[in-house]
Image: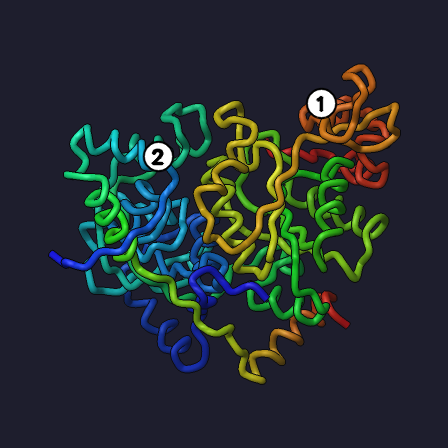
Amino acid sequence: MEKEHKTVSIPASLYKKIEEAVRNGAGSSVADFVAQAVREALEKPVKKQEPEEVFSPEDEEKVKERLKALGYID
Amino acid sequence: MIQPHGGKLIDRVLKGPALIDAEKRAKALPAIRLDAEQTSDIENIATGVFSPLEGFLGEKDFRSVLDKMQLTNGLAWTIPVVLAVDKKTADGLKIGGDVALLNPAGEPAAILHLAEKYGYDKAETAQKVFGTTDAAHPGVAKIMGMPEVLLGGSIDLIRETPTPFHKYKLSPRETRKLFQDKGWSTVVGFQTRNTPHIGHEYVQKSALTLVDGLFINPVIGKKKKGDYRDEVILESYEELIKNYYVPERTTMAILMMEMRYAGPREAIFHAVIRKNFGCSHIIIGRDHAGVGSYYAPFAAQEIFSQFPDLEITPLFFRSFFYCKKCGSVVSDKICPHGKEHQIQFRGTEIRDMLLRGEYPPAELVRPEVAKIIMDEKNPFNE
């Protein structure tokens, strides 16, 4: 277990709810409960934003032609 | 412009040599004939309407959608997009092999790269997606009637199936180009399965004051008995736009897709689809995608609080009515007058008037729209 710890603040109402959950067996302490929840959240896959798709000039022209043919653009 | 869901617009439409090869190979592959709705699903997958899906859900994604309303990669996804076949058909298909997916006319429409075959619990699926197992719910009835094995795997589209609504059918690539061409960076999507009444018009125009453009996107496909026929919906919107909308700020294209009537879950699904079309905003009204009284009136709005990372912004609207004293369309938030001054936009009442051959009052329906409906021999699905 890591020895160094930092302090973070959470709303008192949330703290009370965690205390209650701990009393009901969800973890050994409030600190453990929060640390575990944060670990789980960090393990979730992070969505990567890829750059916006760029059409090839040929594809762009095809799309434009179809939009024109259908009367969507002049 | 807003990014597609998952960051990339899926394109699984075969072209060039790959298309020629697939057309040849499809003739020798085991085949499954799809119905019109399944055919729409493969086109929606291939053209990016359902981005990031690249095919029918595998079991892990299916379970994740049911239990967590997200794909296994963490992206929001609320409606299972699946392909069900009977056990005998499934037994004849090899995992790792390819399967030809035929359109209703029997032509090869796509190739499925079969990755998984798995069973599912119909009652559980219905309960989780629709919040009920009542067989009177059209979505539940559909699940209960589905065959017992689901096939998962990516697909490649060989051909789009012709539709009489071709001129209204745009892919997300095309709508994105269209919005860009019009100079719209913010666009509000309006999902509909109805002919427009004045309440719809008010909501659309109110939303349009906040953004650059309005994208009216009627759902075309299987609907329930008594819903307006697709032709009537499109013609009435054409007439409305022609007479009452600023053409530089409004456009319409269809979404070929079956309504699921999954209420709140479907509202999220609809938002994801409009995001893929390039909409930065979506209008969510009262009982969006609901049916009967299965969902609380504003459940489809409340569910968005569970999806803070959706990126498309929902615009929530309350119930509107015409107030005779105000002389305009209002809601209870802005009108101080009593119920005796209100004329409600009740779709069933408007429908009943039309069925009796009566023109609804101009406070409810534009006369041009009413005429389109009245001129139809049978404007409703049977």
Left or right, B86 with reference to A51? left
Q: Is residue B180 above or below residue B305?
A: below
Residue B30 locus on image (x, y percent): 27, 60
In terms of depth relative to the viewer, which is nearer, B40 or B267? B267
Residue corresponding to mark 2 = B128
**Quadrant for the N terminus of chain B in the image:** bottom right
Left or right, B122 with reference to B175? left
Q: Is residue B152 visible?
A: no
- The residue that appears at 25% across and 29% down in the rendered structure is A20
* Chain letter behind tag 2: B
Give the quadrant of residue A66: bottom right
Residue B356 locus on image (x, y percent): 77, 22
Mark found first going from the N terminus, 2 or 1: 2
The label on residue B349 is 1
Mark 2 lies on a secondary structure that is: helix
Residue B125 locus on image (x, y percent): 32, 36
Q: Is residue B91 above or below residue B135?
A: below
- The residue that appears at 72% across and 41% down in the rendered structure is B203
| Inter-mark Cα distance, 2 to 1 | 32 Å
Q: What amino acid does circle 1 point to? A: Glu
* Chain letter behind tag 1: B
Q: Is residue B219 visible?
A: yes
Total marks shown come to: 2
Q: What amino acid does circle 2 point to? A: Lys
**Quadrant for the C terminus of chain B in the image:** top right
Neighbours of disc 2 within 10 Å: few (<14), some (14-19), many (20+) = many
Left or right, B59 with reference to B220? left
